[in-house]
Image: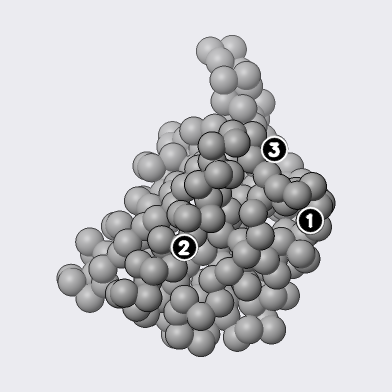
C-alpha cells in the first residue's frame, strides 16, 4: 500500500486513460499458502481477503496487475519454512491468471532502511541513516525476477530509485524516503510516478 500514492498520481496524470484500484492487507501476503503472522487475527482472515481480491478482479478484469509483497522469509501457518524461491513460486501461483498473460508486474519493496527514530537527530547528518541492502532482500528479488521470466511477466526492482551502489539513504533531498524501516513515505511515493511510468512504458505495458 506504500506505493498507492505512486499509482494514484499515475492515474490522475493519465487524463482518464487509466483507473487504478489498490488493495492490500497488513500481514497478509498474496501467496497460495497461508503465512504465519504475529497477529493470529490477521492469519485467520487472510484466506478470505485473498479470495475477495481474486473475485473483485474477476468481476472487473485488470489490464495490468502490479503485485508487491514483503521481501522477508516466512513460515507457513503449519510450521514449514519457505525460502526465497518457494515464496516467489507461491506468489506467482496465487496471482497467476488474475491478469492477461504478460500483464503482471512484480514490483519489489525497497530494501530495509535505517530507523529514523534512532539515527536522525539534531546532532547527526544524513550519513548516520544509511543502510546496506541485505542478502535476504537480494535473494527475494532474484527469485521473483527468475519467476517472472518463466511466466513472461515483468519484475521491477526498487533499487534504482531507493539505493545507490547498494547503499540506501534515508532522504532524497529534503524528502524522507521511508517513514519506518520498510515503507516509503507518501511524499516520496509521488516522486516515483514518472520513474515507474517510464519503466512501464519502455516495457510496452502502458
Disc 3 versus disc 1: nearer the observer: 1
Q: Where does residue 98 sit, x and y in percent of width and height?
A: 47, 76
Which of the colour schemes (rainbow, by chain, secondary structure, one colour) is used? Answer: one colour
Task: Tell me the CA gap for discs 3 and 1.
Answer: 25 Å
The circle drawn on residue 131 is 3
Is residue 170 among the parts visible in the rendering? no
Residue that numbered label 1 is attached to = 82
Q: Compared with residue 161, is residue 169 higher up or lower down, i.e. above or below?
A: above
- Are discs 3 and 1 less than 8 Å apart at CB? no
Question: In the image, what residue occupies the spot 22% across and 76% down?
Answer: 17
At numbered mark 3, what does the secondary structure look like: helix, strand or loop?
strand
Q: Which residue is mark 2?
A: 51
Q: Residue at x 51, y 87 (%)?
A: 101
Quadrant in the rendering for residue 40:
top right
Q: Is residue 146 above or below residue 1?
A: below
Q: CA distance from mark 3 to mark 2?
A: 37 Å
Quadrant position of residue 54: bottom left
Q: Give percent across and percent down for residue 30.
A: 56, 59
Earlier sequence position, callout 3 versus callout 1: 1
174 sits left or right of 91 in the view: left
Considering only order in the chain, which callout, 2 or 3, is on the residue closer to the N terminus? 2
Provide residue 200's location: percent of width, then percent of height: 45, 74
Amino acid at each position: 500500500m506504500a506505493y498507492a500514492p505512486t499509482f494514484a498520481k499515475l492515474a490522475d496524470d493519465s487524463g482518464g486513460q487509466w483507473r487504478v484500484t489498490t488493495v492490500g492487507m497488513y500481514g497478509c501476503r498474496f501467496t497460495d499458502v497461508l503465512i504465519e503472522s504475529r497477529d493470529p487475527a490477521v492469519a485467520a482472515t487472510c484466506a478470505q481477503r485473498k479470495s475477495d481480491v481474486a473475485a473483485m478482479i474477476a468481476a472487473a478484469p485488470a489490464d495490468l496487475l502490479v503485485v508487491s509483497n514483503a521481501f522477508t522469509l516466512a513460515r507457513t501457518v503449519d510450521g514449514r519454512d519457505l525460502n526465497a524461491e518457494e515464496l516467489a513460486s507461491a506468489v506467482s501461483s496465487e496471482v497467476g491468471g488474475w491478469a492477461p498473460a504478460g500483464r503482471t508486474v512484480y514490483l519489489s519493496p525497497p530494501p530495509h532502511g535505517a530507523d529514523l527514530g534512532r539515527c536522525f537527530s539534531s546532532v547527526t547528518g544524513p550519513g548516520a541513516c544509511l543502510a546496506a541492502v541485505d542478502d535476504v532482500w537480494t535473494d527475494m528479488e532474484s527469485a521473483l525476477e527468475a519467476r517472472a521470466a518463466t511466466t513472461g511477466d515483468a519484475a521491477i526492482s526498487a533499487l534504482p530509485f531507493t539505493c545507490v551502489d547498494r547503499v540506501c539513504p534515508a532522504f532524497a533531498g529534503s524528502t524522507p524516503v521511508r517513514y519506518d524501516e520498510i515503507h516509503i513515505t507518501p511524499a516520496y511515493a509521488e516522486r516515483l510516478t514518472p520513474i515507474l511510468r517510464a519503466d512501464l512504458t519502455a516495457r510496452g505495458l502502458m
